[in-house]
Image (tube, rainbow, N blue to C red):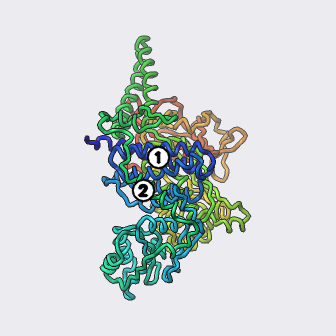
Amino acid sequence: MELSQYLSMFIDESKEHLQSLNENLLNLESNPQDISIVHNIFRSAHTLKGMSATMGFEDIAALTHEMENVLDLVRNSKIDMNPFIFDCIFKSLDSLESMVEDIIQGGTGKADVSPIVVALRSIVTGDYKTAQAPAVTAAKEPAKGIEVDEFQLSILQQSIDSGFLVFYIEVSVNENCVLKAARAYMVFDALEGMGEIVKATPSVQEIEQEKFDRSFSLYFISKVDQATLEKEILNVSEIQSAVIITVDSESLAELSRPRTEVEAARQEIAAAVAEAIAPAVSVENIHNAEAVTAAVKPAAGGAPVASRTIRVDIERLDALMNLFSELLIDRVRLEQLASEVKRNDLTETVEHMSRVSSDLQNIVLKLRMVPVDSVFNRFPRMIRDLAKSLDKKVDLVITGAETELDRTVIDEIGDPLVHLLRNAVDHGIESISDRLAAGKSEQGTIQLRAFHSGNHVFIEIEEDGRGIYREKVLKTALKNGLVTAEQAAKLSDLEVYNLLFASGFSTAEKISDISGRGVGLDVVKTKIQMLGGHVQVDSKPGFGSKFSVQLPLTLSIISAMLVRLGSEKYAIPLSSIVETSAIQKNQIRNIHGNKMVEYRNNVIPLVSLSTLFNVPDFNEDLEEETEIVVVRKGDKQVALMVDEFIGQQEIVLKTLGKYLSGLFAISGATILGDGQVALIIDPNALIK
């Protein structure tokens, strides 16, 4: 039976299960004794195995089967979770995600996962316990320069036990070779086609950056013989020599326990895996998409239930939003006509239509809005892996994950946030020793927040690390010619910190494969600006930094206060308004050339919108009394002078297009019921 029609459903369901597996595994790492979490992980893995087997993706099914074997022992209290087991399962999830991504890109979802399978089987047999040393080196003379951790050691040892060949390889390039990194890449590419590279020295990143002399070493697992390997490596031009040594068990470590029971158990498991994995659902019994969903969607108690959700093409949602915005404009026009005609039956009909369309409006809006949690939920795992690789302790605190953004923005904001978070872990949070020396706790904290303000969403990334030092940034800026010495002396701290977003700017003394403060921040800024937002940074040297990203809600329907300035109409989002009021002209004060007004025992700035927007036919100096709208952004407030309040109204927020982008304090426009266009004021831009 043709299963291609179910492929998109399989991909969506797989991504959901993989995300659930990652989240539950992180929770289990914090609470290793909580067996209920293990049950949840087991159910997700079992469902993913059944789905994969049904769709014919055997490698995914086989790997999840090996995970099930380990999880079954854990949930039955036969083994306890430990760092080695966590690392194995996390690496299994990484491989599963890679295979699903390959399927998304049109591939077959196949991958060589034999090293991970070997490691998982060693957990089942108990053999991994013999490899609990912190780090070892091979006994062979050439291997002294390569250190492997317990996970890598276990992979090498179990590969030997499973019949694979393990090689130690030293490759040297010609002395006059110009593109060393390119030759090294060609060697790696040739080897990866024949097996698996377990460890390389120098690291792959250092080799790519040509941070090696003339030679590099690696451990390699394969079933190809030594002569074939040597031939393939030497086929790469400008390779001077390749020393290949076959590594045996004695070279890796002295095994202290007898192997008889272990081998028997391993053979039993290998025989079980060799059998065809029984699919969770018979393909012949699947007649429609609902059956597939019902088969692969587990309920809270583990029993399969039919899904009550459907997936809709986003273009259809765009069309629905545009149609409803036209309906809203007509509704406002009908309300105006009904008030002019003053017929009771017409008025009642229009009022009923208004109530129904308001309910419809809420549904249409919610269809396009997605919680940022769909982006945030992948960050805890990323931070965990980064902190472990850098030997740091980092706590990621997420707040406001329920904040909703338009789907188009959600799809694009992930990569910039990933870069900012990696930047915070690598160069923001100090090492444990540096934090203790500075009188801080050994665990750094990264705050990831999301919240609404007006018709914008703000996402903040704040860490309690070393902060950004003004002098260091200016030194680099002067060196790169970004500013002159005279300009540098006049820059505020915020302006100095924003130099980090200049193209190619970096204060990092050492380039890192994880991030570099400044490296790529120009790309982050460009991406956010393409979404109609902007990003800025603030810092307190020695105490941490905060990156703040402001994003628009894009096409949306909002409640706004319509105001008049002369002959023009403007809209101010209600979510930004604190209060409307009227003040006498003698209440306005001039402080250092700026207009201020007293408001609730406080003095706040007074902004003349007519002056700001150069509105004709409006002279505020002739007014003895003027209306004001008090708006806020966070804890900051400002009073806006207007000519007249028109009233509250539901409006459709439409962008002004690329030709009118970047207008100060204007976030879009709306069409009113009488056909007039009103500009929508962005209060966030008025408050600094």
Q: Closest to the observer: 198 or 628?
A: 198
How many residues crowd around disc 2 within 10 Å: few (fewer than 14), some, or many (20 or more)?
Answer: few
Residue pointed to by mark 2: 270
Residue at the spot 37% in from the left edge and 26% down from the top edge: 330
Q: Position of residue 170 (x, y in %)?
A: 43, 80
Specify the amino acid type for callout 1: Ala
**Which numbered disc covers residue 45?**
1
Q: Is residue 661 above or below residue 442?
A: above
- Please state if 524 lies on the left or on the right of 450 as rendered: left
Whether residue 665 is visible to the viewer of this picture, yes or no, is: no
**Which numbered disc covers residue 359?**
none
Residue at the outermost left position: 1
Q: Quadrant of residue 247?
A: bottom left
Label 1 sits on a secondary structure element that is helix
Q: Quadrant of residue 185?
A: bottom left
How many residues crowd around disc 1 within 10 Å: few (fewer than 14), some, or many (20 or more)?
Answer: many
Residue at the outermost front position: 260
Q: Position of residue 481 (x, y in %)?
A: 50, 74
Residue at the spot 69% in from the left edge and 41% down from the top edge: 598
Residue at the spot 46% in from the left edge and 61% down from the top edge: 118
Q: Position of residue 143 (x, y in %)?
A: 50, 79
Specify the amino acid type for callout 2: Ala
Q: Position of residue 8 (x, y in %)?
A: 34, 43
Residue at the outermost top position: 344
Quarter the N terminus occupies:
top left
Label 2 sits on a secondary structure element that is helix
